[in-house]
Amino acid sequence: MANRGRIETVELKRPITFNGKLFTSAEIEIDHINYGLDPNTAQLKTRKRSQFTVKDVLEFLRLLDGEALMRTRRERGRDIFVVQLLSPLTGKTLGGTYRMVFSTSQAEKELIGAITLFKIRE
């Protein structure tokens, strides 16, 4: 598996209910989100594509609260979801539509993971 860089695990101040399950913590692949992966090597790119903080990514995850979605695929015991979201963040460069890839797991029942997040070019 590729080096995904720094991964932050945080307890949620307010739990997220998604697909009828309660999530109390989030695992955020912050380097994967900000750098992206090289499609040829599956390694982190060297140039940043975004400047998201863990707090910013939590705002995107919060948009899932109360939602019910079908998984896109199953991979290594995790359900992987791909969604398009309008940015909950304000600011000149933060608006627009983003694609977020996130996961849930039967083994880690209360953990939701943000794998990557990037702006969709319009």
Image (cartoon, rainbow, N blue to C red):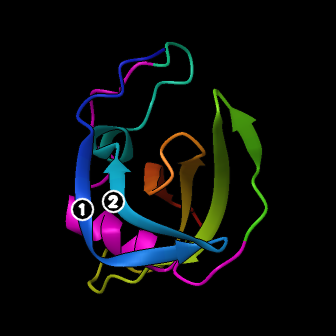
104 relative to 5, above or below: below
- Residue 50's quadrant in the figure? bottom left
Give residue 116's position: percent from left, percent from top: 46, 48
In depth, the one of 91 and 116 nearer the eye is: 116
Does the magenta portion include 39?
A: no
39 relative to 90, above or below: above
Q: Residue at x 33, y 59 (%)?
A: 25
66 relative to 27, above or below: below
Q: Is residue 87 left or right of residue 31?
A: right
110 relative to 87, above or below: above
> Which image quadrant: the C terminus?
bottom right
Q: Secondary structure at mark 2?
A: strand
Q: Amino acid at mark 2?
A: Ser
Q: Is residue 76 left or right of residue 47?
A: right
User: What residue would you read off at disc 2?
Assistant: 25
User: What residue would you read off at disc 1?
Assistant: 11
Range of residues picked out in magenta: 43-68
Q: Tell whether label 1 touches label 2 (CB within 8 Å).
A: yes
Give residue 38's position: percent from left, percent from top: 47, 24
- Residue 110's quadrant in the figure? bottom left
Q: Amino acid at mark 1?
A: Glu
